[in-house]
Amino acid sequence: MILIPIIAVILALFLDFFFGDPKNRYHPTVWIGRLIGKFVPYTRSSNPLIEKINGIILLVSIIVIVSIPLVFFSYTIQYVGNFDSNGLYKVLFLGLSIISVGILLKTTIAIKGMESHASKIISALSKNDLDDARVKLSMIVKRNTTNLDRQHIISATLESISENIVDGITGPLFYFSIFGLLGAFAYRTVNTADSMIGYKTEIFQNVGWFAANCDKTLNFLPSRLTSLVMVLSCIILKEDWRHSIHVMKRDGSKTESPNAGYPMATLAGALGIRFEKIEHYVLGDGNSEISEKHFKSTISIMKITTILFVLIFTIPMIILLSSLGWWFNV
């Protein structure tokens, strides 16, 4: 059965690299987001403590709702796979299991989708349509994009890509390698909740408190591990990997998030550029203007990092845990 998760990971990457995300009406992460949106109004209270408790109940409930069909799917695979049967049946079962797990895992990662959306921002900038670029950027970042100039728009785009390497790629793969599909989807549920309600605003500071802190905890290891793998990507792509290590160590902890700064600082150092979120942080010390060339390099780093992460961590972890007797729950 160990072949199922290993080949499924490879299939998931293939599907994402070449086909990207399914339409919203077929996308589980979109369903999770809509489910969160429907429950949020019921968490409101004039009592901050009650709102925090409601926020905890909200996130736990969504994770349970998401987990039930996955647990059923997992036990179905295990049950059917234990039947004694001829070779043809085993081959068909193995093939269907790999395809099913691969498709489901693919919905938790977003490589091509991020590249596609970021490309639209860069395309708008190439046409000098700053208003359109700001609108498109606002769809992938939390900051106010209304008055951002060209350089800050590009900077925010590349920062978002580097954050997405963890949130939308290595994070799900990290938890899939340890807890199977249940881990990948639980992670994406927390990450989605954080992106929707994990704001320190008057409306969400209590309701989103639990989601925000869960996201910080879950991303602690993946963000740092991903940054190291990004350095290896920079070596392969002949970027300035030594400087990427220097900036990561120096600036990685400068962001409000204890995790997001590490991949961003690593990228800034590798490309010799500077990321700035006005009145919040400055990462890197490059003086060169951020250009389309830097965007293309960022996409290359994202893709190579994804492949290396699977080869260096995901697959070896699956093999290790299986060899130690850990029942891999797909």
Image (cartoon, rainbow, N blue to C red):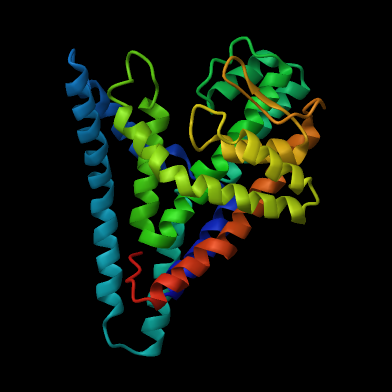
Residue at 61 percent of width and 16 percent of height: 278
Residue at the limit of the structure toward the bottom, as seen here: 86
Residue at 46 percent of width and 55 percent of height: 174
Q: Left or right? Give the position of 28 relative to 207.
A: right
Residue at 65 percent of width and 14 percent of height: 148
Task: Tell me residue 150's x, y (percent).
Answer: 72, 18
- Number of marks in picture: 0
Residue at the limit of the structure toward the top, as seen here: 147
Viewer-proximal residue among 82 and 198: 198
Quadrant placement of the C terminus: bottom left
Q: Left or right? Give the position of 133 relative to 315.
A: right
Task: Tell me residue 59's x, y (percent).
Answer: 27, 36
Q: Is residue 17 above or below residue 62?
A: below
Q: Is residue 221 above or below residue 276?
A: below
Task: Tell me residue 325's x, y (percent).
Answer: 34, 76
Q: Left or right? Give the position of 330 relative to 42.
A: right
Quadrant placement of the N terminus: bottom left
Viewer-proximal residue among 35 and 187: 187
Residue at 29 percent of width and 56 percent of height: 70
Could one spot residue 126 in this view of the protein? yes
Q: Is residue 139 above or below residue 11?
A: above
Could one spot residue 1 in this view of the protein? no
Task: Tell me residue 143's x, y (percent).
Answer: 53, 19
